[in-house]
Amino acid sequence: MFKQLLCPTLERRAKETTETTAAQVCSDESVQAAACTVKAALGGSPLYAVVNNAGTSTGGGHGATEEGVIDTNFYGPKRVCDAFIPLLDPAVGRIANVGSGAGGGYVNRLGETEEARMLMKGDATWDELVEYVKAKMPTISLDDHGVYPAIYGLSKACLAAYTQFLAKTHPGILSSCMSPGFIDTAMTKGYGGSKPPEEGTPAIRKCLFDKLEGNGWYYGSDGMRSPYHFMRNPGMDVYDGVMPF
């Protein structure tokens, strides 16, 4: 789904319209086709923002495979960014990657290790993240952490690290990652997700429309800066950016 602001004359208020185009984020061809559709619709105007919200898990109501989780949650945003970054306004464009507190929980369980440092410090390359994911997948258990098993946490931790990579490789574009909170969706049915979808938007709206103080930062569901190494809940201290080790 994408929006355009159309203003045929200065006397007429801009009319907001919403258009949709289908894209399968696990398919290079599908994502590229969607980008071509959006480019044509924009008619030469730049795209303001990309929101990567597609996600899945082996738990809950989705029942995806381990490979499907990684392909959707980790490789999917990369495919979308590769296809749509050329359409973004290079001066004011934004990327909002929808992460999860499960990513911080995954990093927290790693302890004070080089793995954790790589996922936090922000200088991992895309190739390094890919190699890390490939190495970790055979060791991940599907039987823990309920609706958010370790494979899901791995995918979201690496998505946050990829967001930091985007900030370094595309400094003119503001890239952010955020947690919407534990939202009541088909994926969380029976696992306690109680917040309605409309309450999952504050962090996304902040990353899209507010003045941001940093690039590549992670935000909690309350829109406050949050750490990469544990799940910060609303009301807790705002993350100061200091590495814990």
Image (spheres, rainbow, N blue to C red):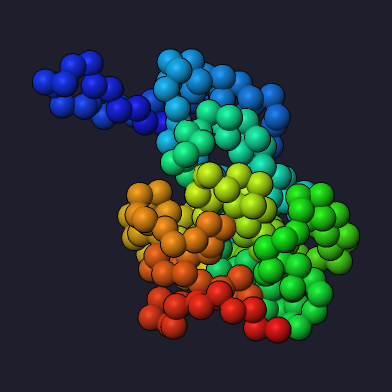
The N terminus: image quadrant: top left
Image quadrant in which you'd find residue 7: top left
Q: On the picture, is 242 further left or further right than 226?
A: right
Residue at the spot 79% in from the left edge and 71% down from the top edge: 115
The C terminus: image quadrant: bottom right
Whether residue 18 is situated above or below residue 139 in the rendered picture: above
Residue 58 in view:
no
- The picture places residue 148, in percent across and down from the top left corner, at 62, 65
Residue at the spot 42% in from the left edge and 31% down from the top edge: 2
- The picture places residue 187, in percent across and down from the top left corner, at 54, 56
Residue at the spot 53% in from the left edge and 57% down from the top edge: 215
Residue 173 in view:
yes
Residue at the spot 63% in from the left edge and 25% down from the top edge: 32
Whether residue 77 is situated above or below residue 47 in the rendered picture: below
* Foreground residue among 148 and 90: 90
Whether residue 19 is situated above or below residue 66 in the rendered picture: above
Q: On the picture, is 71 further left or further right than 140?
A: left
* Foreground residue among 2 and 146: 2
Image quadrant in which you'd find residue 144: bottom right
- The picture places residue 228, in percent across and down from the top left corner, at 61, 70
Q: On the picture, is 124 further left or further right than 51?
A: right
- The picture places residue 3, in percent across and down from the top left corner, at 37, 31
Image quadrant in which you'd find residue 135: bottom right
